[in-house]
Image: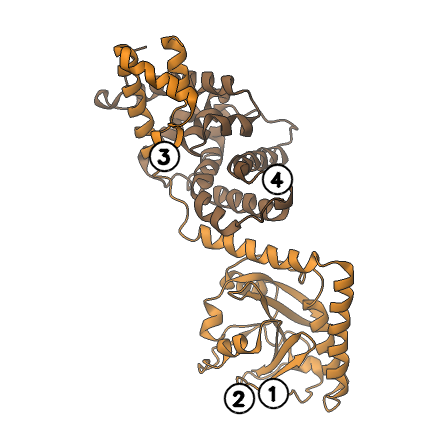
């Protein structure tokens, strides 16, 4: 290897710890001992590399970029893990969900048909293969609320503090029986979703809403009434994990936006129910 | 059989160099962050296709570069966009260059270097790829990587010498 060839090889050299074991570099480096001009060139080359790398290291990624990437990856993995289930398992899962729905429906005839219908439709929406369809995918809760506000969909602001600090998978604005409604999907630490469906209670013929958390097949579901709105929470996460999210909530209601878009004007003075109690 | 990828570790180790590479391509913080996120999302979706875990780094940089070029093509009314320095200048937005001045200066200088050399230099400096990884990423022979690195550094040294004060120049004894 002559001097020019050694220079070309050493142009690709990074450091001893990364490239020192590579035979092609070992051979070129060995020539430094006997070639003063080559050695001087290599020192200058190393200085250039060090200086350029130091300057480019000034390009810092946004502080929240890693968290955003991980949130999107977790959301994608959850969707794919459901979607990737073999057909036989999907059939079993579907039977479990439908069986749970039927059981729940048969034991809760007190509510109106309208409420039962909403409950069934909402759970069907969130339990769809691959996760529910979202209009906006974002880990930022504020972005989901802005999106829902802009699309005149109801949403709930006074969330439990632990949920406020949690990342979301995104949200969806939709219409159920001519009433605007919304879905917000929270990403729990273990990668599972917690879904929140919000709709004007008038859409349900003001039916009596059962309190506490219920099991519906593989799902845990809880309803809340807030300022004329119905909040439906649904998740496949363990009951204990969900309890941790809700039992600490004691804050007052700060407001529900877009609460009475259609068709009736519901007063915002409707008092809250003691909705954070948990039933097993 | 290929072991499952530890995506979180891969993100932790590589999101910074990927972002820097994306920033060098886009000169825009938001676009660079989006491009970085999209690249990892593609890895999540296509991880079954990544047969050699040791080449994951090259795969990520190749994918990011491909996504950048795809985005450029979709933005342009022309089907093919050649990445010349003039075009790079058009991508610089007023709000984008909020990075350290030194980094910005180096990026400006890099943008003036001939495309074939610049890509190799960016992968070498920003992505910290080895010559073998650069060869895989750009799909060119190892010898070509070395000669482009050598000539690219020569151009870089010359341009930096014109940019920086005399005390900070990098004389080339060759």
State the CA–CA distance, disc 2 to disc 4: 54 Å
- Name the residue furthest top: A2
Vertical comparison of B56 with B105: above or below: below
State the CA–CA distance, disc 4 to disc 1: 51 Å
State the CA–CA distance, disc 2 to disc 3: 56 Å
State the CA–CA distance, disc 4 to disc 3: 31 Å
Instruction: Give residue A177's quadrant in the image.
Output: bottom right
State the CA–CA distance, disc 3 to disc 1: 57 Å
Task: Give the chain of mark 4.
Answer: B
Kindly report which numbered mark, 2 or 4, lies closer to the viewer in this rendering.
4
Q: Nearer the viewer, residue A149 or A5?
A: A5
Which numbered disc flags the more N-terminal residue, 2 or 1? 1
Disc 2: which residue: A274
The colour of chain A is: orange
Instruction: Give residue A221's quadrant in the image.
Output: bottom right
Question: Is residue A46 at all visible to an observer of this figure?
Answer: yes
Please identify the quadrant where the N terminus of chain A is shown.
top left
Disc 1: which residue: A211
Q: Nearer the viewer, residue B112 or B9?
A: B9
| Left or right side of B80 for B101 | left
Label 4: element kind: loop
State the CA–CA distance, disc 2 to disc 1: 8 Å
Disc 4: which residue: B51
Disc 3: which residue: A56
Which numbered disc flags the more N-terminal residue, 2 or 3? 3
The colour of chain B is: brown
Q: How many marks?
A: 4
- Name the residue furthest left: B167
Q: Are marks 4 and 1 on the same chain?
A: no
């Amino acid at each position: 290897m002559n001097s020019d060839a050694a220079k070309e090889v050493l142009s690709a050299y990074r450091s001893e710890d990364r490239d020192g074991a590579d035979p092609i570099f070992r051979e070129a480096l060995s020539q430094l001992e006997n070639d003063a001009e080559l050695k001087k060139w290599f020192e200058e080359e190393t200085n250039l590399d060090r200086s350029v790398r130091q300057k480019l290291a000034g390009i810092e990624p946004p502080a929240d970029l890693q968290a955003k990437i991980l949130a999107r990856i977790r959301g994608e993995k959850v969707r794919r893990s459901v979607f990737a289930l073999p057909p036989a398992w999907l059939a079993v899962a579907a039977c479990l969900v439908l069986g749970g729905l039927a059981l729940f429906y048969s034991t809760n005839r007190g509510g109106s048909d309208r409420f039962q219908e909403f409950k069934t439709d909402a759970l069907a929406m969130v339990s769809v293969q691959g996760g529910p369809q979202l209009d906006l995918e974002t880990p930022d809760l504020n972005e989901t609320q802005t999106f829902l506000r802009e699309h005149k969909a109801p949403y709930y602001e006074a969330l439990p503090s632990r949920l406020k600090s949690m990342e979301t998978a995104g949200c969806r604005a939709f219409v159920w029986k001519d009433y605007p409604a919304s879905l917000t999907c929270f990403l729990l630490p273990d990668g599972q979703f917690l879904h929140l469906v919000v709709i004007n209670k008038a859409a349900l013929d003001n039916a009596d809403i059962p309190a506490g958390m219920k099991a519906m097949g593989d799902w845990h579901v809880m309803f809340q009434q807030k300022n004329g709105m119905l909040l439906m929470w649904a998740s496949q996460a363990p009951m204990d994990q969900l309890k941790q999210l809700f039992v600490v909530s004691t804050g007052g209601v700060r407001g529900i936006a877009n609460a009475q878009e259609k068709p009736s004007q519901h007063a915002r003075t409707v008092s809250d129910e003691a909705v954070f109690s948990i039933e097993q | 059989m290929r072991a499952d990828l530890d995506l979180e570790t891969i993100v932790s180790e590589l999101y910074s160099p990927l972002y820097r590479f994306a920033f060098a391509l886009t000169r825009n913080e938001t676009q660079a962050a989006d491009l970085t996120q999209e690249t990892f999302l593609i890895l999540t979706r296509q991880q079954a296709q990544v047969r050699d875990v040791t080449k994951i780094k090259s795969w990520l940089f190749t994918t990011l570069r491909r996504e950048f070029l795809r985005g450029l093509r979709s933005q342009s009314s022309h089907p093919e966009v050649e990445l010349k320095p003039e075009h790079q200048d058009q991508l610089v937005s007023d709000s984008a260059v909020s990075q350290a001045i030194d980094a910005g200066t180096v990026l400006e200088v890099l943008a003036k270097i001939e495309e074939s050399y610049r890509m190799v230099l960016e992968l070498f400096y920003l992505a910290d790829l080895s010559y073998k990884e650069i060869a895989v990423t750009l799909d060119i022979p190892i010898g070509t990587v070395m000669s482009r690195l050598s000539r690219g550094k020569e151009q870089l040294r010359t341009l930096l010498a014109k940019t920086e004060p005399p005390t900070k120049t990098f004389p080339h004894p060759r």
